[in-house]
Image (tube, rainbow, N blue to C red):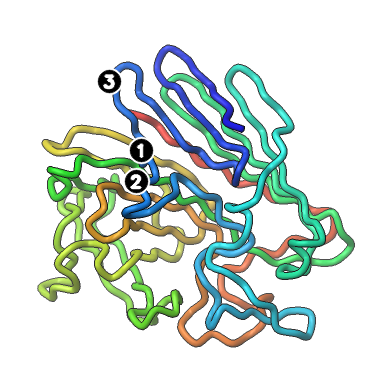
Amino acid sequence: MIHTMENEDLRVQIADKGAELISIFDKKKKREVMWQADPAFWPRHAPILFPNVGKHWQNVYRIKGKEWRSSQHGFARDLIFACVGTETAKVVHELCSNESTLESYPFAFVLRVSHSLEGRILKVCWEVENPSEETMYFAIGGHPAFALPADRYGECSLFFEGKESLTYHLIDPAGSGTVMPKTYTLALKDGCYALDTLRDGDEVIAEHTFDRDALVFDGGQIEKARVLLPDDEPYVELRGTGFSNYGIWAAPRAPFVCLEPWAGRADNYEYSGLLSEKPDINTLDAKEEFVWCYEIEIL
């Protein structure tokens, strides 16, 4: 089922599958902001990544004295959430652990996802609850994709207010989906980075920004990022605090860009330690809960 929220500025739609945001239609400018899941490039809109973000090394992680198989970005994005609250300007979904989830993730959990609309701002919140008596470990992240004009993609840019540069890592080019150790610098001009050639100083890393997959930013560097259309037209701003990691990605040559606030991320290359000791893993003690929120403002 698809749930719709609407005001004089925006019309927003959320699906029960994955509690996924699938549409933000700007009524004032008469355009769809979200990527519409063209399977020729990438068949999703804004999946929720849980209980892992990215991949574990060799698709295996270790906890409770054994190895567990995992899949990229976890299972939540492919499951049907229960809609537990619908209001004029708010939709709440819930997913609970069950026999099927326990086969690949040995922790009880409750994941609640809320989407709230006010004016031109959509607020997305994730509440993770540990209902059990044991400590649980997890990562969680967002993956919203914003549509860009295909014929002028290279004229679009990202703006990071107050930043002169950012540091990032790349994904293993051999296909493991894990994060390589080398650190690169993303130089910004007046806070802006054009979606074109990817460079590290004078070194050309890739002809196009995402030819090497996602850019992975650690250390809580990004709390606010803005997408600019050609001629520096303000388009979308995503804001969120408390996220240890951040991804920016698009399928190669696809007319969209993903701004991805993450609490945790893919394994480091060749990581074989315990899940509980993984960098940036989230720890939730018995009966505790965490809440993360971010906002999407349509400019």
Query: Left of 51 or right of it: where is 57?
Result: left
Q: Nearer the viewer, mark 1 or mark 3?
A: 3
Query: Left of 205 or right of it: where is 134?
Result: right
Residue found 57% across the figure and 31% down from its top: 2
Which residue is label 3 attached to? 29
Task: Name which of mark 1 and mark 3 comes first in the sequence.
Answer: 3
Circle 1 residues within 10 Å: few <14, some 14–19, many ≥20: many
Residue 199 or residue 40, whichever sits in front:
40
Which residue is label 2 attached to? 225
Q: Position of residue 278 (x, y in %)?
A: 60, 76
Q: Position of residue 6 (x, y in %)?
A: 49, 18
Q: Label 3's element?
A: loop
Callout 2 amino acid:
Ala
Q: CA distance from mark 2 to mark 3?
A: 21 Å
Callout 3 amino acid:
Lys
Q: Label 1's element?
A: strand
Which residue is label 1 attached to? 237
Q: Position of residue 19 (x, y in %)?
A: 60, 41
> Is mark 2 in CB contact (under 8 Å) with mark 1?
yes
Q: Quadrant of the N terminus?
A: top right
Q: CA distance from mark 1 to mark 3?
A: 16 Å
* Residue at the right extreme of this rendering: 133
Q: Nearer the viewer, mark 2 or mark 3?
A: 3
Task: Name which of mark 2 and mark 1 comes first in the sequence.
Answer: 2
Q: Label 2's element?
A: strand
Quarter holding residue 151 = top left
Residue found 72% across the figure and 47% down from its top: 95
Q: CA distance from mark 2 to mark 1?
A: 6 Å
